[in-house]
Image: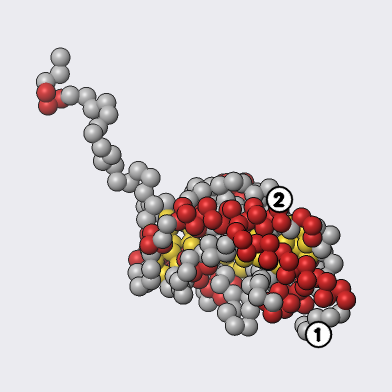
Amino acid sequence: AKMDGDIEKIATKKATVPEAYSRPWALFDNARSGFAALLREFEADGGRRVLLPAYIGWSAKEGSGLWDPVRSTGLELSFYRLDRRLGVDLDHLRDRLSAGASTMVLVVHYFGRPAEGGREAVALARGAGAIVVEDEAHAMLSDVVGGICGRDGHAAFFSLHKLLPQAQGGMVVTKGPGFGERALDQGGAVVAEPWSWDLRAIADVRRRNARCLADAMLPLAEDLEPLWTDWDERAVPQTLPFIVKRANRDRLYEELNSRGVGAVSLYHTLVDPIVREEFPDAHWLARRIINLPVHQDVREEDIPKVVAVLGEALEALRTGSDGGRAS
């Protein structure tokens, strides 16, 4: 028999291994600052190039949260293709990875939905020895509440102000010791932490609003088609994206906002290196996408009003009674 001091510990009274399931994090002014910190660490470690998905936009007011941080480094830049539904072209990614240079691959979970082919893309990249960063600027709630993205790469970053009612804020999370540790040291911004809100309740409202809006939009199917109809029930949308099939997207955007519906178009203008000849699907989508609000301030009873405004806006564009805006 073992003496008292030598008792075999089958199950301890509480967890005592701090590194198990560790997910260190740090706050930044915004998501682009967090991404820039990860890029600086990668470059300092001898990294040579970054592979980005070929659907990255910019605006004259805000620039580009992905393109601008990469341009501020000395890293080479390349793009891998996405299809018209923003699914990863795994064959194209595989070809780009075969170049052999020390590489960081960015996988973007657009609008809160985990990237189609994203897990396979991460596995390909990691198998090739690449560092993988998951862009969850839109997908923090799909990660933290839904638990369906953000766990496969070496690090991820969030944009707090794109999902929560605050003016700014970003966050970088890592998988513990390894890549990203020094990037976290560059954080420490004085912004509200996401834990200040009931994230589960916000996620539930956003999911409900997305379901209700998708159902209410069915009568407009000849004009507006959901970008995706196969949302995982655990995913939490940042906005609900649609493809404008017949109307001029820019004029529809103007009409909706002038009538009180806060539509956006992500990303209506792609960065210059994403050329139409090489990435036609990206340009096809950029000309047609419109994103409708489903955030936690939208009340369920407001959704029929949103759809009614959409119908009125489309009719105005068909009949030319929109006043000639945004031709």
Front position in the image: 11 or 271: 11
Mark seen at residue 229: 2
Give the mark, 1 or 2, whose residue is nearer the N terminus: 2
Dot 2: element: loop
Question: How would you rate the neighbour count of disc 2 (Cα within 10 Å): few for under 14, some for 14-19, many for 20 or more?
Answer: few
* Residue 91 place in picture, x, y as percent: 71, 50
Q: Amino acid at mark 2?
A: Thr
Q: Quarter of the image containing the N terminus?
A: top left
Residue mark closest to the camera, 1 vs 2: 1
Mark seen at residue 323: 1
Dot 1: element: loop
Name which quarter of the figure residue 278 lies in. Answer: bottom right
Residue at the image point whose x is 52% and y is 52% from the top: 204
Asked if residue 314 shows in the view, the reply is yes
Q: Quarter of the image containing the C terminus?
A: bottom right
Q: Amino acid at mark 1?
A: Gly
Front position in the image: 33 or 266: 266
